[in-house]
């Protein structure tokens, strides 16, 4: 049994298809990243998996159970930090952990959990006085109280400064090392790349790419290319004197040559030298996950949160 | 199934947070006590309701067979004894009318030099009453002076007073403070749980704390019960403080019996649930706050908390009878002031029914999760 099996999942908000027939599975011990711009349907998907929302169609199994109908059983076995985690203001992380332990009727060593999430030094600080990063770590600590096999982290680092993000990444890597299965939503590409074994890129409620980041880049990105700084004449010369496909980027003054094989670079450079024309800086490039993401996702990530209404408007404009 | 362990865990974490919030604690516990101090001081201080009258007494008395009779002093004592007018006598060297206008005094009385002499001789004598026609007290002053005159006239002509009046209070020696203590206890029972739960339920919804708690085994009913327990504790503490201040500082004459316990339990149950209901059916904390105020404020003033509803016009008294707080306050009064336990039993029944209905509604309508 896989920890998560999603088949043709659908969820509508009125006329808007927030989740439009997605399917994926998550393996034991894997970190699975749901990547996409705001409004892509990540949070809706993850909340359906957590049993917080009812689906309109398709099939979802979390640890073999329907999370909406068997919410109580599923909640005993999963850990969750919701987006923008908050807690009772005048409560310390240690008290919060003990509170959760009583709710789950389990005995925990609060200090050990605090150590796991790198929060020992703030154990006695009121929640309202914690920094943004420490607050998220408190959320992470609470999600660990019931020793879950499966963790859901919904945008765990959104709004944090770079140091706090890196500290949280360390915590998440530590949890992965302990064998936890983790589902992570994020709109940060570097975060997905740093933490995830596999990534699903979501856009307008659909999964537009799925696999390891390398696989996605290979499948959806252009291959390696050579760029030579020079004039348009140079581009014409190379095109005329080799078998290569040559493009010219006017803005940057670059001759761009996609490389089908490494040896193509040599032919291109030889032609450039023969031309007698000036040519400067050379480099070979490959699409990063960023490039692929921009290509796959129809609209660049906005600043707003998940707003179905606005998303709906965008869709209409597109059609 | 309800779990005592979870309710207690939630009670513990919530009450600890509450105690750490000094501002909340102040409003929860100290504010009603301050209200008792303020209202108690305003209404139980001596002299409230008496009108001051300045008197110039030029009477020289009368000598009869070597003995001096001073009728004017007896006359002024009689006026003072009404309890409504307080007499201040000024020196005879003052020009009386000038003194009155110089000191902006509304009510004055001048007793002429031959007052005792004429009275004893049963000759007519004229006293002069000064009142301000635009003032509010002139009528009372004239009425009292005339009443005292009539009394003295009767005596002088050997008439005996046939009709006499004696004033008595109803119930135990009830005064304003006795009424104020149960009223303000009702106020505290309403305000603390109601405002807190409106605020909690709407803000927890907004900042997703409810969503988060829904991922734990805690149920929404357990959550609400834990809050109700806390407000029962808080209302009871508040009760003890207010009763202590009422008795020790203002000499309130109130009865303390186990009959009060149902009100201290059912009251917070009712109003915490009502607050929860308001927070649940509204979309955001701002609307919740407004609706909360719309529900709370009329109840706060029209339920007999600060003054008896008998002071209000009839239609407002009818309104009072549909406000749940009215039955809490009436019940507290029935127990603490009138020892009317049959009446209190009816109030308890009414409060219990409303409380249970609202509690069930609040739990039913309140959603942890979204669809």
Image: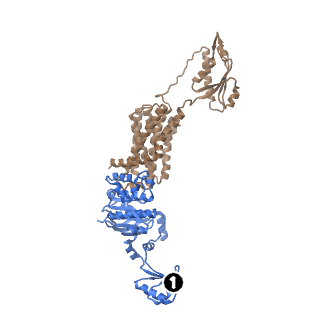
Chain colours: A blue, B brown
| Picture quarter with the C terminus of chain B | bottom left
Q: Position of residue B369 (x, y in %)?
A: 39, 56
Q: Position of residue B20 (x, y in %)?
A: 44, 47
Work out whether residue B370 or residue B357 is closer to the camera in this orientation and state it. Answer: B370
The answer to which quarter of the image holds residue A110 is bottom left
Q: Position of residue A211 (x, y in %)?
A: 36, 72
How many numbered circles are shown?
A: 1
Q: Is residue A14 visible?
A: no
The answer to which quarter of the image holds residue B156 is top right
Q: Is residue B139 visible?
A: yes
Mark 1, secondary structure of its residue: strand
Q: For the view shown, which residue lies furthest in the left direction? A: A1
Work out whether residue A318 or residue A77 is closer to the camera in this orientation and state it. Answer: A77
Q: Does residue A86 sit above or below B83 in this rendering?
A: below
Q: For the view shown, which residue lies furthest in the top direction? A: B65
Work out whether residue B109 or residue B42 is closer to the camera in this orientation and state it. Answer: B42
Q: Residues within 10 Å of mark 1 (few under 14, many from 20)?
A: many
Work out whether residue A177 or residue B358 is closer to the camera in this orientation and state it. Answer: A177
- Which residue is at 54% across, 31% downward? B45
Q: Does residue B370 sit above or below B244 in this rendering?
A: below
To which residue does mark 1 refer?
A: A230
Label 1 marks a residue whose chain is A
Q: Does residue B246 sit above or below A78 in this rendering?
A: above
Q: Position of residue B180 (x, y in %)?
A: 49, 35
């Amino acid at each position: 049994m896989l920890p998560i099996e999603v088949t043709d999942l659908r969820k509508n908000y009125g006329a808007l298809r927030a989740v439009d027939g997605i399917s994926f599975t998550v393996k034991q011990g894997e970190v699975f990243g749901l990547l996409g711009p705001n409004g892509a349907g990540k949070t809706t998907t993850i909340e359906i998996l957590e049993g917080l929302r009812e689906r309109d169609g398709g099939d979802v199994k979390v640890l073999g159970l329907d999370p909406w109908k068997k919410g109580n059983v599923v909640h005993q076995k999963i850990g969750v930090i919701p987006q923008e985690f908050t807690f009772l203001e005048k409560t310390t992380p240690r008290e919060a952990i003990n509170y959760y332990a009583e709710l789950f009727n389990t005995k925990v060593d609060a200090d050990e959990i605090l150590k796991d999430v790198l929060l020992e030094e703030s154990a006695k600080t009121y929640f309202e006085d914690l920094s943004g990063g420490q607050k998220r770590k408190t959320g992470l600590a609470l999600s660990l109280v019931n020793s879950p096999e499966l963790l859901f982290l919904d945008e765990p680092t959104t709004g944090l400064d770079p140091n706090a993000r890196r500290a949280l990444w360390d915590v998440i890597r530590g949890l992965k090392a302990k064998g936890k299965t983790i589902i992570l939503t994020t709109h940060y590409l570097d975060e997905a790349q740093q933490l995830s074994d596999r990534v699903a890129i979501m856009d307008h409620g659909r999964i537009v790419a799925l696999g390891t980041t390398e696989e996605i880049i290979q499948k959806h990105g252009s291959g390696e290319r050579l760029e030579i700084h020079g004039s348009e004449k140079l581009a014409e010369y190379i095109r005329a004197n080799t078998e290569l496909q040559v493009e010219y980027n006017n803005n940057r003054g670059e001759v761009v040559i996609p490389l089908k094989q490494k040896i193509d670079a040599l032919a291109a450079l030889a032609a450039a030298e023969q031309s007698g024309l000036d040519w400067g800086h050379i480099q070979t490039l490959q699409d990063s996950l960023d490039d692929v993401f921009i290509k796959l996702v129809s609209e660049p990530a906005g600043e707003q949160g998940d707003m179905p209404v606005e998303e709906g408007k965008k869709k209409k404009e597109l059609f | 199934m309800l779990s005592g362990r979870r309710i207690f865990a939630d009670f513990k974490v919530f009450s600890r947070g509450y105690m750490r919030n000094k501002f909340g604690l102040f409003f929860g516990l100290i504010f009603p006590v301050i209200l008792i101090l303020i209202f108690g001081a305003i209404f139980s201080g001596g002299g409230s309701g008496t009108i001051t009258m300045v008197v110039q007494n030029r009477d020289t008395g009368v000598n009869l067979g070597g003995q001096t009779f001073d009728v004017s002093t007896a006359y002024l004592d009689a006026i003072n004894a009404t309890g409504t007018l307080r007499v201040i006598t000024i020196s005879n060297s003052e020009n009386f009318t000038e003194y009155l206008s110089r000191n902006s005094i509304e009510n004055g009385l001048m007793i002429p030099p031959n007052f005792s002499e004429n009275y004893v001789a049963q000759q007519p004598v004229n006293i002069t009453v000064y009142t301000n026609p635009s003032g509010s007290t002139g009528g009372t002053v004239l009425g009292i002076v005339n009443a005292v005159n009539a009394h003295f006239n009767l005596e002088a002509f050997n008439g005996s007073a046939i009709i006499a009046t004696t004033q008595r209070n109803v119930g135990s020696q009830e005064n304003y403070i006795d009424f104020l203590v149960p009223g303000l206890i009702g106020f505290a029972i309403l305000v603390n749980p109601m405002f807190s739960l409106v605020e909690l339920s709407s803000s927890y919804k907004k900042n997703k704390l409810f969503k988060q708690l829904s991922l734990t085994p805690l149920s929404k009913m357990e959550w609400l019960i834990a809050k109700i327990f806390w407000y029962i504790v808080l209302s009871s503490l508040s009760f003890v403080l207010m009763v202590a201040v009422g008795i020790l500082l203002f000499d309130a004459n109130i009865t303390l019996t186990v009959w009060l316990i149902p009100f201290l339990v059912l009251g917070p149950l009712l109003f915490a649930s009502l607050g929860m209901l308001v927070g649940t059916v509204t979309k955001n904390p701002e609307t919740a706050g407004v609706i909360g105020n719309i529900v709370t404020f009329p109840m706060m003033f029209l339920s007999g908390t600060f003054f008896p509803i008998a002071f209000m016009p009839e239609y407002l008294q009818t309104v009072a009878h549909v406000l749940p707080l009215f039955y809490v306050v009436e019940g507290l009064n029935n127990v603490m002031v009138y020892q009317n336990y049959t009446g209190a039993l009816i109030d308890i029944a009414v409060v219990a029914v409303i409380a249970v209905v609202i509690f069930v509604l609040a739990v039913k309508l309140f959603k942890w999760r979204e669809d």
